[in-house]
Amino acid sequence: MKQIIISLIKQLVFLLLFFAFARLIFLIYYCIELKGIDFISISAVFVHSLKLDLSTACYILIFPSFLLFVQSLFNPKWINLISKTYYSIVIFIYSLISSAELGLYEEWKTKLNYKALLYLKHPGEVVSSVSSMQSVVLIALFLFQFIAGFYFYRKYFSTCINYSKRNLLFSAFFLIVTPVLLFIGLRGGTRQIPINQSESYFSKNMILNMAAVNSGWNIAQSILENKKYINKNPFIYFSSAEANKIVNRIKTTPKDTTLFILKTKKPNIILFILEGWSADVIESLGGDTGITPHFSEMEKEGILFTDFYASGARSEQGMAAIFGGFPSTPYSAITNQPSMFVKLPSFSKMLHDDGYKTSFYFGGQLIYGNIKGYILFNQFEKITEESDFPENTPKGKLGIHDEFVFDKMLSDLKSESQPFLYSVFTLSSHCPYDIPSKENFTWKKQGEDYIKSIHYADRCIWDFINEAKKQKWYKNTLFIFVSDHGHDTYKSWNFYSPQYHKIPLLLFGNVIKEECRGKQISKTGSQCDIPATLLPQFGYDNKIFKWSKNLLNPYCPEYAYFAVEDGGMGWIRPDNYFVWAQNTNTFYEISIKNSNKDSLLKEGKSYLQVLFQEYINY
């Protein structure tokens, strides 16, 4: 039985080494692009790749593990042959994928993905787009990788199982334990959130992140994410010309102007992304008194948007909307698509390119929805998450509590140069709401744990603001508070209702003009409108964000859209809205107070049609 265990371990070691070998070829092939990057950073690629490599290896080992279990019961020689044949196929396919990426990255700056595979339907065009010399080099590298991989597997890692005695107790143990270990390995451990590309992202140099992501894992994920919808828009209701005409009319702003609210065009910015803060926790937005008393105090000195909505129901959807102004789509999030989000603009990249120092803070792990990968691409120079805090920092089940994250950010800001863009994603108001102290706040309605966690986060923010007021940078800093998505509350809104998706957006700080403080903006908008609203204040052109509108422009159109996960959308106009499901062709909710029902439905469907078409075209 010792042979069985040794064989499994050797197969695992081979796969990890083979993945590293393919990665080394990639780095050597693109060594010119690595100029200026230090050796330690390049070497770190192999460290940060290990977890995703291990996950990929565990997927590949499922079939060989089954063969080893069969061999623990009886031992015909043909099973060894099946195992060798299986690995020759694995080595061939992986060599083909990694070699194809060598040619693809030069043109697309992404890893091999499902959309790239679609080009294989027209092999003549693919061959024509690659020079003869490059074709020869890529074929040679493919053959070299395949032959070398197969040779070393056969010579050093292939084990022919050969024994005469059976041990049923060992077989039973192997059958129970091995699947459990493989399952833990393939999902990246026992944590709640399964592993994804973000686990390998570690550098502001995207070529290092691309090299660290396992090629096999990436293409498999891309196929699963896109195979159903990447080639065909399921939301076709009108001709392309008609739908685009309607959307252009919706987005048309008759006059390009804005209300200037800031004393300076180059303020520092601290962006608070509030985990799961519903409008129902804000008194002035219809919530009960006392849940967020400090937020209410800040409203008196800030600017509150009172008819504001989340673009989706998940954090990663909120990130793409807030930073990139890109609306959420049904079925999938663009943050999960590195080959797509590299084509999106973001206001953080614009500020970074203009000299802003950029940092992102989170008390947990940013792997969910590939948020870390998205954030790194968008030019956040420093990312601080759970693993960057001292071991003795108090934390809950999901990570470091908000107050300690804020303390860390305050400490780092003392030595930061200006101007800066700091973003912090709060955590404590996420289930299981295990805040570190009991709040002196009584709540007798439903959702007590959630409400008390919001009350705690509100207090932590207030403490942060009071400490910030003592800092030299405070007088030139704009604070932005916005939720990542809505949340179920004591009001028990339907998940699909606009009220569920309604969230706060507050601008606050000494940098706001005195005459603008205490204002409420009632224009209907969403997270997607943040870039176009803010950038004119800093003297930037916002036209690159074509799904975003300036809510500080008195003439901007009023509407909000949000995605329905199971296929559909919510469409909101002042005093009118509907939430419609494509799959069942039914309305989850509808409230239209005038006779323009057909016109409103046509607007919403056209918006979704054009949006999803742009999404799959990326």
Image (spheres, rainbow, N blue to C red):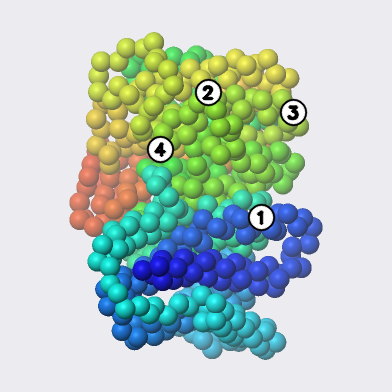
Residue 188 higher or lower than 554, as above or below = below
Residue 415 is tagged as 3
User: Residue under circle 2?
Assistant: 403
Residue 262 higher or lower than 110, as above or below = above
Three-letter amino acid code at the position of disc 2: Glu
Does label 4 or label 2 sit earlier along the sequence? 2
Between the C-alphas of marks 1 and 2, the distance is 31 Å
Going by the picture, which residue comes out furthest to the right?
A: 36
Dot 1 alpha-carbon crowd within 10 angstroms: few under 14, some 14 to 19, many 20 or more: some
**What is the x, y in percent for residue 264?**
71, 28
* Camera-nearest label, 4 or 2: 2
The reply to whether callout 1 and callout 2 are in contact (CB within 8 Å) is no
Three-letter amino acid code at the position of disc 4: His
Check disc 4 and report its element: helix, strand or loop.
Answer: loop
Q: Tell me the residue at 55%/61% (across/down).
A: 213
Residue 443 higher or lower than 28, as above or below = above
The reply to whether callout 3 and callout 2 are in contact (CB within 8 Å) is no
* Camera-nearest label, 1 or 3: 1
Dot 3 alpha-carbon crowd within 10 angstroms: few under 14, some 14 to 19, many 20 or more: few
**What is the x, y in percent for residue 344?**
56, 55
User: Residue under circle 4?
Assistant: 485
Q: Tell me the residue at 64%/31% (across/down).
A: 269
Between the C-alphas of marks 1 and 3, the distance is 27 Å
The reply to whether callout 1 and callout 4 are in contact (CB within 8 Å) is no
Residue 44 is tagged as 1
Three-letter amino acid code at the position of disc 3: Ser
